[in-house]
Image (spheres, helix red, strand yellow):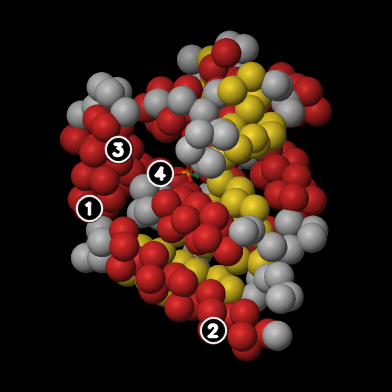
């Protein structure tokens, strides 16, 4: 069967990665979490003192970009992808609030986007890929055969992220998460380079009132339509 490219974009914490991961596993496609790549660059900045009282040391970060190697490896137990930064597994560290509160300004830097988009396009060259993010259907893979744009209310998204962090045993405050979700929405939608927006040919999914199982079935049906339409 011919392989296609699937782009899943949407707001922070709206369940994109859960649905993208599940679909990829079921149809045997590669799954790439582009947000994890922006988070890994943010962690690099934290670990290397590139956040200054005035913001980000962009000159140093730009010089360091060629030395920031990001890759993914499947966890053999869970079959879930783990993010590696310069050979070190940083999957847990990139999901902390410390990274969440700093990632959007890093992701708004044009030279960061340019480098990561290039890497993402390389990863998708052979198709058979599900990638989620903010600009996958608009910038990274404008020719993707299936594009989904996911939305849900900020309160529901904050609650989901809160439950996720708690389940992992991490400290979390619902109010802090809600404020972060809203702040990232604002930065992601208003940045100059590749702002978050729905591609014209993307299918809108409001999953505010859908269970994980319901959204999984919805996506599986859309995948079938896209594949059959293209074969
Ligand atoms: O999982 P969550 O929705 O919290 O966010 P994420 O997908 O891990 O992405 C973290 C941040 O990276 C977002 O808030 C965006 O600022 C940025 N990002 C982006 O600019 N472009 C992408 N393709 C993916 C993420």
* Front-lying residue, 114 or 72: 72
Q: Quadrant of residue 211?
A: bottom left
Q: What residue would you read off at disc 4?
A: 184
- Of the numbered discs 4 and 3, the one sitting upstream in the chain is 3
Q: Residue at x 45, y 46 (%)?
A: 187
Q: Picture coordinates of residue 50 (x, y %)? A: 60, 17
- Of the numbered discs 1 and 4, the one sitting upstream in the chain is 1
SS class of the residue under badge 2?
helix
Q: Picture coordinates of residue 158 (x, y %)? A: 26, 44
Q: What residue would you read off at disc 1?
A: 156
Q: Which of label 4 and label 2 is nearer to you? A: 2
Q: Quadrant of residue 14?
A: bottom left
- Of the numbered discs 3 and 2, the one sitting upstream in the chain is 3
Q: Picture coordinates of residue 157 (x, y %)? A: 28, 50
* Total count of labels: 4
Q: Quadrant of the N terminus?
A: bottom right
Q: Residue at x 29, y 23 (%)?
A: 170
Q: CA distance from mark 4 to mark 2?
A: 33 Å
Q: Residue at x 61, y 85 (%)?
A: 228
Badge 1 vs badge 4, beta-carbon distance below 8 Å: no
Badge 1 vs badge 2, beta-carbon distance below 8 Å: no
Label 1 Cα crowd, 10 Å radius (few <14 / some 14-19 / many 20+): some
Q: Which of label 3 and label 2 is nearer to you? A: 2
Q: Is mark 2 within 8 Å of ligand 1?
A: no
Q: Quadrant of the C terminus?
A: bottom right
Left or right of residue 216: residue 131: right
SS class of the residue under badge 4?
helix
Label 2 Cα crowd, 10 Å radius (few <14 / some 14-19 / many 20+): few
Q: What residue would you read off at disc 2?
A: 225
Q: Which of label 1 and label 3 is nearer to you? A: 3
Left or right of residue 63: residue 74: left
């Amino acid at each position: 069967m011919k392989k296609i490219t699937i782009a899943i974009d949407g707001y922070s914490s709206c369940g994109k990665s859960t649905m993208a991961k599940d679909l990829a596993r079921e149809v045997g496609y590669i799954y790439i979490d582009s947000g994890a790549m922006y988070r890994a660059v943010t962690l690099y900045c934290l670990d290397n003192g590139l956040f200054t009282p005035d913001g980000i040391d962009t000159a140093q970060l730009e010089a360091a970009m060629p030395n920031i190697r990001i890759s993914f490896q499947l966890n053999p137990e869970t079959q879930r992808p783990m993010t590696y930064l310069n050979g070190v597994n940083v999957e847990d560290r990139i999901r902390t609030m410390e990274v969440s509160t700093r990632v959007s300004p890093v992701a708004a830097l044009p030279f960061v986007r340019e480098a990561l988009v290039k890497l993402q396009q390389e990863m998708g060259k052979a198709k058979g890929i599900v990638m989620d993010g903010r600009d996958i259907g608009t910038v990274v893979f404008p020719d993707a055969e299936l594009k989904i744009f996911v939305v849900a209310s900020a309160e529901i998204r904050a609650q989901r992220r809160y439950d996720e962090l708690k389940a992992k045993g991490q400290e979390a405050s619902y109010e802090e998460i809600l404020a972060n979700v809203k702040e990232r929405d604002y930065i992601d939608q208003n940045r100059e380079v590749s702002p978050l927006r729905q591609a014209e040919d993307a299918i809108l999914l409001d999953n505010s009132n859908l269970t994980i199982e319901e959204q999984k079935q919805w996506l599986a049906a859309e995948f079938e339509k896209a594949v059959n339409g293209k074969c």
